[in-house]
Image: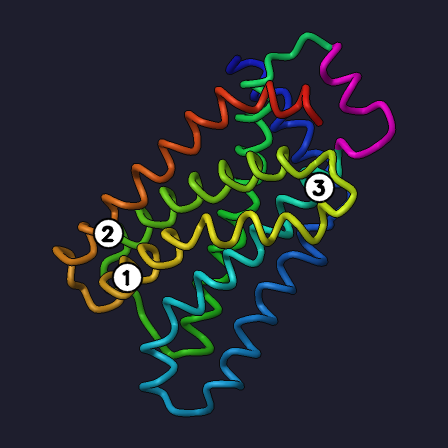
């Protein structure tokens, strides 16, 4: 399973490096979201600083949908999914590999956005380890949930419009917990921030386990 996951993750990342879709579409979209939010909130520094964590995670969530759609589009060609099923690759490995590829893209995106909120909103992270742990757990949960629901909608003709409706409500706990954890990281309130990690951790674990178990049947049904 793990070898298959590495193969699939490597394949997806090589495709992204060659196509540069994430670089020229997903990343500019996320930065544009932050810039538009900054314009919408106005020049008040206190308002921008208080809203920065929530706006950061909104940009990450929207970008997760785009990255997941791109991940599913890689196998959207005629006969591609059938070939993948006949290749003998473990479906759990396919799920973990695709989720890992999406997670790598989201990690790079978050690093850029972290610099963006410092520049645009004038905030500085006081407790870096708390922000990093929250981001890692959230990234695992977002990528696993995105790939799982991407597989659920893959066989439908309206998958491009259905996927956001499936994913965004489900990942609302990540938006809430991630925003609160980052707010605590900005102010240095470690005790209040670690309590929100108790939501991000189980969320990530549940979707990884569910994805490993259900990805194969979803692929067969697609």
Q: Which residue is mark 1?
A: 180
Determine whether, in the image, residue 190 is placed left or right of residue 114: left
2 and 1 marks in contact (CB < 8 Å): yes
3 and 2 marks in contact (CB < 8 Å): no
Residue located at (64% from left, 52% from top):
66
Q: Position of residue 206 (x, y in %)?
A: 37, 32
Q: Secondary structure at mark 3?
A: helix
The residue carrying pointer 1 sits among few (fewer than 14), some (14 to 19) or many (20 or more) residues within 10 Å by Cα, namely many
The residue carrying pointer 3 sits among few (fewer than 14), some (14 to 19) or many (20 or more) residues within 10 Å by Cα, namely few
Q: Position of residue 117 (x, y in %)?
A: 44, 71
Q: Residue furthest top?
A: 88
3 and 1 marks in contact (CB < 8 Å): no
Determine whether, in the image, residue 173 is placed left or right of residue 113: left
Which is nearer the eye, 147 or 130?
147
Question: In this rendering, which labeled residue sits more in front, label 3 or label 2?
Answer: 2
Determine whether, in the image, residue 221 is placed left or right of residue 76: left
Q: Which residue is mark 2?
A: 196
Q: Which residue is mark 3?
A: 17
């Amino acid at each position: 399973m793990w070898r298959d996951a590495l193969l699939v993750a490597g394949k997806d990342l090589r495709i992204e490096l060659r196509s540069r879709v994430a670089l020229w579409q997903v990343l500019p979209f996320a930065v544009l979201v932050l810039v538009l939010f900054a314009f919408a909130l106005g020049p008040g520094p206190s308002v921008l600083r208080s809203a920065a964590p929530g706006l950061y995670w909104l940009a990450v969530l929207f970008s997760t949908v785009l990255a997941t759609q791109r991940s599913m589009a890689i196998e959207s060609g005629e006969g591609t999914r059938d070939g993948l099923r006949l290749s003998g690759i473990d479906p759990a490995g396919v799920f973990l590999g695709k989720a890992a590829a999406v997670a790598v893209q989201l990690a790079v995106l978050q690093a850029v956005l972290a610099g963006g909120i410092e520049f645009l909103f004038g905030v500085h992270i006081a407790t870096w380890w708390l922000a990093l742990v929250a981001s890692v757990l959230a990234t695992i949960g977002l990528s696993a949930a995105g790939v799982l629901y991407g597989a659920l909608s893959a066989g439908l003709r309206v998958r491009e419009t259905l996927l956001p409706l499936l994913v965004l409500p489900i990942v609302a706990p990540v938006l809430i917990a991630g925003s609160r954890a980052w707010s605590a990281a900005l102010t240095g309130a470690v005790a209040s921030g670690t309590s929100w990690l108790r939501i991000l951790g189980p969320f990530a674990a549940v979707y990884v386990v569910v994805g490993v178990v259900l990805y194969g049947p979803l692929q067969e049904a697609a």
